[in-house]
């Protein structure tokens, strides 16, 4: 079972994966943590645990000290990296606090995916997702699950209407929503607007159109475990019931909503805004890519995925088609969100890009 691969897992496989990540959390005094390369060792004498650090976990650990994470990224794969190792290990040895290291085992190897405070209160997908699926199941006449993925920082699940909401030529567009949650402190539990073009199987995420944003207090009482795996309950049953109730309420509001009316104007306007005559599509795509913060290499690849539809919808379709070919699902969601940002450009924005082109 791989993590963060750029594939859309069917909902059955995804639900199984979410419920069986073999989550384990470990308590450790900071001064008993040792970093070596991209690995972390808990316990400097006697009983020890060794894990590979995800990029997010390593960033959290180094981010405990101002500027150290920036230096880590700069030193990576250079002769300076041993300097970073000595610095972070010396800093840890002077740290009087206790840490929680969150781990999972997605593909046979246990990895450290977060390094957080000993007061971090986990509100994980295995608690939330069954409630979301149960509510959406009550509205199965309208919605179907498109699937999703678990990454090293977030979980994504997409739902779309059973029948297309709009049609532009051969393109049948479904309106939907995306559930996302982070178990490692990288964002709130959120339901965002999502579009799906069944003709080219493109997804488009409207990051600026959040349907429901459920924010939890992840800070609780300090754990009593001094070292080793944490078995103690960090939430009371009443709190768990309240959390489940909140996610059910949010899911119900989203499932009952008529989101097609919200995006109708976006879609119709995007189809009518054309790339002006005399402007090269390649230059226009490059400038749009720059506008939504695509990398230089991504901007260069856009033309490969551009199908010649010379309007705003066609431009975002090139970006969201590219999203299917990037290495990780995290990059896929980033590009799909860039597609949503392109769809949200107004007349003034569009004319400004045309002038640059």
Image (cartoon, rainbow, N blue to C red):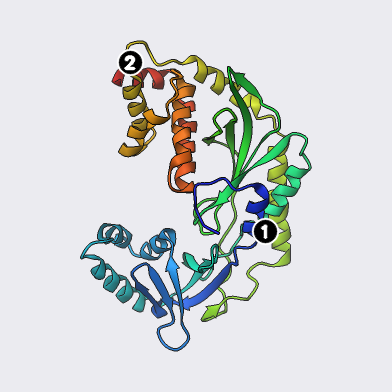
Callout 1 environment at 10 Å: few (<14), some (14 to 19), or many (20+)? some
350 sits left or right of 132 in the view: left
Tell me the residue at 75%/48% (across/down).
134
Is the C terminus in the top left, top right, bottom left or bottom right quadrant? top left
Label 1: element kind: helix
Q: At which x and y percent is residue 15?
A: 66, 54
Tell me the residue at 32%/70% (across/down).
88
Tell me the residue at 38%/13% (across/down).
276
Kindly identify which residue carries mark 1. 127
Kindly identify which residue carries mark 2. 279
Label 2: element kind: loop
Query: Which corner quadrant of the image does residue 169 belong to?
Result: top right
Is the N terminus in the top left, top right, bottom left or bottom right quadrant? bottom right
Query: Which corner quadrant of the image does residue 106 belong to?
Result: bottom right
The residue closer to the viewer here, 334 or 235, is: 334
N-term mark: 2 or 1: 1
Callout 2 environment at 10 Å: few (<14), some (14 to 19), or many (20+)? few
* Residue 165 position (above or below residue 212): above
81 sits left or right of 340 in the view: left
* Residue 60 position (above or below residue 275): below
Question: Is any part of residue 333 visible from this angle?
Answer: yes
Question: Is any part of residue 344 visible from this angle?
Answer: no
The residue closer to the viewer here, 225 or 310, is: 310
Q: At which x and y percent is residue 211?
A: 61, 37
Q: At which x and y percent is residue 79?
A: 20, 65
206 sits left or right of 37 in the view: right
Q: Residue furthest bottom?
A: 46
Q: At which x and y percent is residue 336?
A: 49, 37
Tell me the residue at 34%/18% (across/down).
354
């Amino acid at each position: 079972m791989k993590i963060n691969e750029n594939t859309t897992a069917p909902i059955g496989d995804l639900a199984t994966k979410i419920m069986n990540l073999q989550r384990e959390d470990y308590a450790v005094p900071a001064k008993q943590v040792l970093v070596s390369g991209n690995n972390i060792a808990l316990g400097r004498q006697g009983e020890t645990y060794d894990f590979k650090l995800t990029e997010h976990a390593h960033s959290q650990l180094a981010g405990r000290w101002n500027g150290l994470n920036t230096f880590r990224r700069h030193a990576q794969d250079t002769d300076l990296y041993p300097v970073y190792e000595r610095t972070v290990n010396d800093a840890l040895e002077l740290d009087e606090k206790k840490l929680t290291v969150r781990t999972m085992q997605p593909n046979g190897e246990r990895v450290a995916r977060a390094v957080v405070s000993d007061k971090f209160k986990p509100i994980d997908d295995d608690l939330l997702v069954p409630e979301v699926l149960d509510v959406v199941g009550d509205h199965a006449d309208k919605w179907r699950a498109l699937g999703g993925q678990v990454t090293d920082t977030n979980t994504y699940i997409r739902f779309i209407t059973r029948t297309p909401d709009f049609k532009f030529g051969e393109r049948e567009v479904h309106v939907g929503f995306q559930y996302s949650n982070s178990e490692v402190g990288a964002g709130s539990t959120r339901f965002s607007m999502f579009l799906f073009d069944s003709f080219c199987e493109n997804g488009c995420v409207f990051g600026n159109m959040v349907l429901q944003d459920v924010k939890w207090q992840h800070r609780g009482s300090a754990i009593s475990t001094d070292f080793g795996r944490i078995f103690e309950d960090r939430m009371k049953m009443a709190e768990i019931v309240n959390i489940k109730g909140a996610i059910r309420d949010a899911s119900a509001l989203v499932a009952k909503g008529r989101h097609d009316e919200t995006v109708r104007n976006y879609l119709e306007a995007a189809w009518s805004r054309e790339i002006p005559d005399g402007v090269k599509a390649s230059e226009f795509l490059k400038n749009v890519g720059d506008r939504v913060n695509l990398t230089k290499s991504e901007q260069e690849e856009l033309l490969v995925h551009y199908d010649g539809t010379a309007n705003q919808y066609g431009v975002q379709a090139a970006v969201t088609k590219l999203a299917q070919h990037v290495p990780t699902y995290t990059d896929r969601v980033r590009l799909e969100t860039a597609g949503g940002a392109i769809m949200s450009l107004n007349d003034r924005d569009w004319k400004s890009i045309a002038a640059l082109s």
